[in-house]
Image (spheres, rainbow, N blue to C red):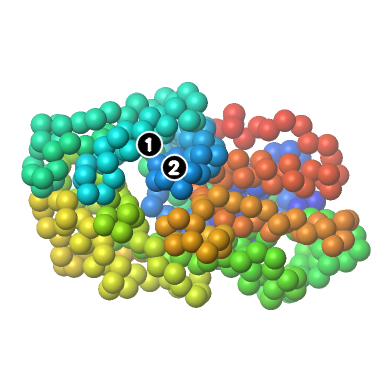
Amino acid sequence: MTELFDILIIGGGINGAGIARDASGRNLKVCLVEKNNVGSATSSWSTKLIHGGLRYLENYEFKLVRESLKEREIIKNIAEEIIKPIPFIIPHTPSQRPRWLIQLGLFIYDNIGGKSSLPRSRKINITKEIPNILKSKFQIGFQYYDLQVDDKKLVELNIEDAKKRGAFIIENNQAINISRGDENWSIELDNSLTVKSKILINASGPWINDVLTRVIKQNSKKLIRLVKGSHIITKKFYEGENAFTLQNKDKRIIFVIPFKGNYSLIGTTETEVDSPDNPKIDNDEIDYLLKSVNNYFIKQLTKKDIIDTYSGIRPLIEDYKEASKVTRDYIFDLNLEKESTPLLNIYGGKLTTFRKLSENVLSSISPYLPIKLKGSWTHLKKL
């Protein structure tokens, strides 16, 4: 392949797919390389929610929550075929968080993101409105809305749109050697193909520092923490379409969400791991999720009720806090060792903010692009 690309992206998860779509829609020559199928790793191992991150308010991450809620509304409009608004119930447990604190959090959640088409939060009488689901000690609760999404399809739709706009997508092929020249990057793939690009973007998620040091041969300036989030799937074990946000004694929360009509999706855990490869749920995580659910629901679940599991690895920016308090925000590391060949490494991020992240990537590298960028566009065009 002799064509010189403006941008080459390593990683076909949601961030890489979003960047490819945005950049190709601005008439840039884009190539994306993914070692497996697009959307086959972290981006399809999520809790499958587009949400503002209600619990991030406890960590004072108001900027992230505001951006996430704005993006929630945009994604609801541009990806409506794979989006479903879903009501979440928080059963009130005085031993965890006081009622006033939850109400304050929900008030902020309703308002910090600006105008929303989703219903506002409200207090509910659990005994009257959703009887015979939760144990009798849970009588008062709070309802709010977020969005359920087909996460893998969201990646694929971005990739499809990028292709239509001229992006070149290479799947099941990985970069094995990358060298930095004076005028461009040379990317050697494992099928002996060599691709050249002016700008290199490392969007490889939990593999980011491995790709950076082993393949790009640059030192990492940022540390990440690999945190495994595991889920279990059971047959649906209660009536109705409500999801539940459950508070645990360790101050973490888990979700119980209606899934594909006849099932319940329960997650997620937060277990630190050393490697992003082949994540699997372990017995401690299963016990943790079952214990959390059984503390709330009349129907008691056992391991025999589990029909499937999956786990994903979140690459969190290391800030030496406990895993549940580590930010889900993203940061960029722009390497201008040679200004003619920029390297942008993307650390962190979450499913909900992929589109805004993509816009910010283009803004960060705009001084080094061959064309002057015009205004943003992906918030208006449906996937």
Q: In which quarter of the image is the N terminus?
A: bottom right
Q: Which of 26 and 137 is in front in this view?
A: 137
**Residue 355 appears at what percent x and percent y?**
58, 42
Query: In the figure, is residue 335 to the left or right of 210?
Result: right
> Could you tell me which secondary element the residue under label 2 belongs to?
helix
Decide: is 268 above or below 354: below
Q: Mark 1–mark 2 contact, CB under 8 Å?
A: yes
141 left or right, relative to 373 = left
Residue count near mark 2 (Cα–Cα under 10 Å), binned few <14, some 14–19, many ≥20 = some
> Which numbered dot is residue 350?
none
Q: Is disc 1 placed on a helix, strand or loop?
A: helix
Please state which amino acid type lies under the numbered disc 1: Gly
Residue under label 1, please give it.
105
Considering only vertical position in the picture, is 158 above or below 79?
Answer: below
The quadrant of the picture occupied by the C terminus is top right
Q: Is residue 158 visible?
A: no
Name above or below for residue 30 compared with residue 84. Answer: below
Which circle's residue, 1 or 2, is located before the other in the chain? 2
Q: Which of 253 and 301 is in front in this view?
A: 253
- Is residue 59 visible in the rendered structure shown here? yes
- For mark 2, what is the residue? 57
Q: Residue at x 22, y 49 (%)?
A: 95
Could you tell me how many numbered marks the image carries? 2
Question: Where does the image place residue 267, in percent across and percent down from the top left?
Answer: 32, 56
